[in-house]
Amino acid sequence: MTVPANITKSGPYTANGVQVDFDYDFKIYASTDLEVVQTDLDLVESVVSPSDYTVPAAGLNNDAGGTITMDVAPTNLYLITIRLAPPAEQQTNLRNQGPYDPETVERALDRLALQIQYLYEIATRAVLVDISSGLDPADLIDTLVASTATAVAAAAAAAASATSASKRTSIADADARSLATTDVDKYVYYSGTGGHTWTIPTFASQAIGADEEIDISNAGTGNLILTAAGGVTVNGVVAGSITLPPWTTGTLKKIGAASNVWHWNGYYADGWA
C-alpha cells in the first residue's frame, strides 16, 4: 500500500475550552506515530504528554486518519496542532532464509516513508543557505536576530524622537523680547507683570525659514504687545502691532523663505494697526 506524500500535520485548531476531540488526516500505525503540540496565548509551543490524550484504535492503519481525545479540554483560544512524528527506529526483523511476507516488507517501507515525510516537514520550516554558500545557518540566524533587535531598537528610538519632537519646549520671559530662531517650534510665554513688548524681527536679523512656527501666550498680569519690526508684515499690515490680554494665546507662522511676511493665528484685543 502506498503512502500519501502531501499530509503530515493537521491544524492548528483553535480551542474553545470545551472541545476535546481533534482530527488528524494522515496515516499512522501506532499512537506513538503522532505528536500533539499546544500553543498558548503568548505563542509559546509545548508538546502535550501522550498521557494527556488517547488515540482510538479506529484511527490506526487508516489512510483517512483518525481522532485524538484530550483528557481535559484545552484552554480557550489555545492552538492545537497534530503532526506526524514516527519514532526514528526500524522495528522489522527479517530472518535469513526465513519466509517472505510482502505485507511485512511493505509495512516496513511505509513506516520508512512516514519517517522521511516527518523529516521533510521539519526541513521545509528550517532556515536554509544556498548549497554553494559558506555561511553557517546558525550564523545566519544570529545575524537575523541581531538585525531584528537593531531594527526594533531603531524603531523605538525613532518613535521616541518623534514623540519628543511633537512636544514643544516652554520658554518663559518676564521682560521685553525680540523673537529669534531659538524660539522656533517653542511655546514662548510672557510671565511678567505690568506688560511688555515683544518684537517680530526681520529675516535679516533672524533667519527664520518658511513655515516655521512660534507659539506665543500671555501668562502674565499685564498686556503683551506684539510689534512687527520695520519692514515686517503680519496679517497684511506692515510694522503694526496687536495687544494680547492676559491668558490669550496664538501662533506666528512664517510665510516664505527669505521674506518678512508672517501670519498670526489666535486671539488679540484689537486688529493689527
Image (cartoon, helix red, strand yellow):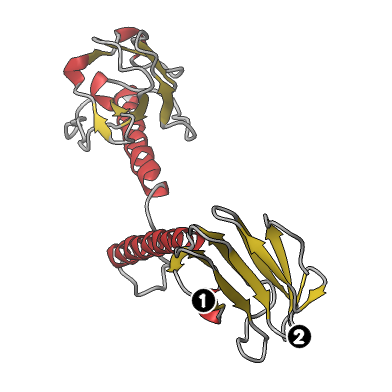
Depth order, front residue of 7/36: 36
Whether residue 238 is situated above or below residue 8 in the rendered picture: below
Q: Position of residue 19 (x, y in %)?
A: 37, 9
SS type, badge 1: loop
Q: Quadrant of residue 62?
A: top left
Picture coordinates of residue 252 (x, y %)? 65, 67
Q: Which mark is residue 176?
A: 1
Tell me what residue is drawn at x 41 percent, y 60 percent.
160
**Residue 271: x %, y % from top left:** 77, 61
The residue carrying mark 2 is: 231
Q: Which residue type does callout 2 highlight?
A: Gly
Q: Nearer the viewer, residue 130 or 20?
A: 20
Looking at numbered disc 1 in the image, what kind of residue is underneath it? Ala
Query: Is residue 181 something one can see in this rendering?
Result: yes
Q: Quadrant of residue 44?
A: top left
Q: Is residue 216 left or right of residue 121?
A: right
Disc 2 residue crowd, few under 14, some 14–19, many 20+, Cα 10 Å: some
